[in-house]
Image (tube, grey):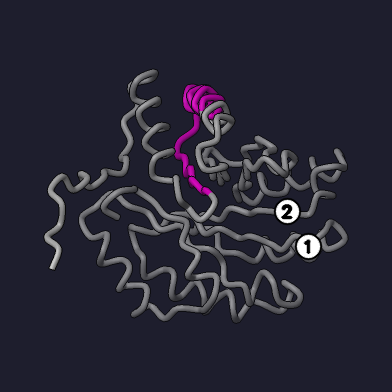
Amino acid sequence: VQHFNCIELNATHYKVNEPEAILKWKVKAEGRDFLFCPKMFKGVTHQGSLLNKQATTAAFLDGIKAFGENLGPIFIQLSDTFGPERKEELFTYLQSLPGDINFFLELRHPEWFLNEKLRRELFNTLYQLKIGAVITDTAARRDCAHMHLTIPKAFVRYVGNNMHPTDFVRIDAWIQRLKHWLDNGLQQLFFIMHMEDELCAPEMTVYMAEKLQQLYGISVQKPSFISPQTTPPTLW
């Protein structure tokens, strides 16, 4: 919360948290323009059918609502094996979600993107339900970088390669695209920076933030770094 203005909160993926536990995170962001983007509990998304998860989903949401004004979108990530043969199951579950909370869906099975008819049906359904589609930009899976906006918000998961030269090319392309989206009605952007072991995520975030400021006058919070120690430590 001291260096960024949002977080993809993976801790919520591993257990259903009581409101009291959520409040311990919320208090750290008190008075700050900061949003938590909790990942849906894996007991819903990765274990069994989605059709019998109403009670588990309700318990998850009861805790998450404790974030209050610091709650960003809830990120529903399904497993790589969740394919289009479970389409009706997915759509039925999504229809059951409350409309007063913002959700984004990430699908990883390649068949969702290869079949054009299915692809259109997927994004049209998300549009009708006012659910966002996560865009995942990773070198190994270009199909997941689908660039569809089903609501006037975007949730981008950028997976870089520890500041390899191609990372800068990809970020520069994103900066141009984001300006186009903003000029055409994009209301909110969640751009989550991932690196291998998260080693260079802060540096890459600074690069992107400074480019947005330099080119378009868009100011976003960026990490600040501790100055390197100049005086050698005393050896005992």
Q: Secondary structure at mark 1?
A: loop
Q: Residue at x 31, y 44 (%)?
A: 223
Quadrant of the rendered image containing residue 117? top right
Farthest residue toward the front? 236
In the foreground, 232 or 39 = 232
The residue at the point 20 percent across, 55 percent down is: 31
Q: Is residue 178 magenta?
A: yes
Instruction: Check whether the beta carbons of the residues at disc 2 and disc 1 lie within 8 A of each other.
Output: yes
**The C terminus, quarter of image:** bottom left
Dot 2, crowdedness within 10 Å: few (<14), some or many (≥20)?
some
Region in magenta = 172-195
Q: Earlier in the sequence, mark 2 or mark 1?
A: 1
**Residue identifier under label 2:** 108
Residue at 48 percent across and 24 percent down: it is 179
Q: Amino acid at mark 1?
A: Phe
Q: Which residue is mark 1?
A: 82
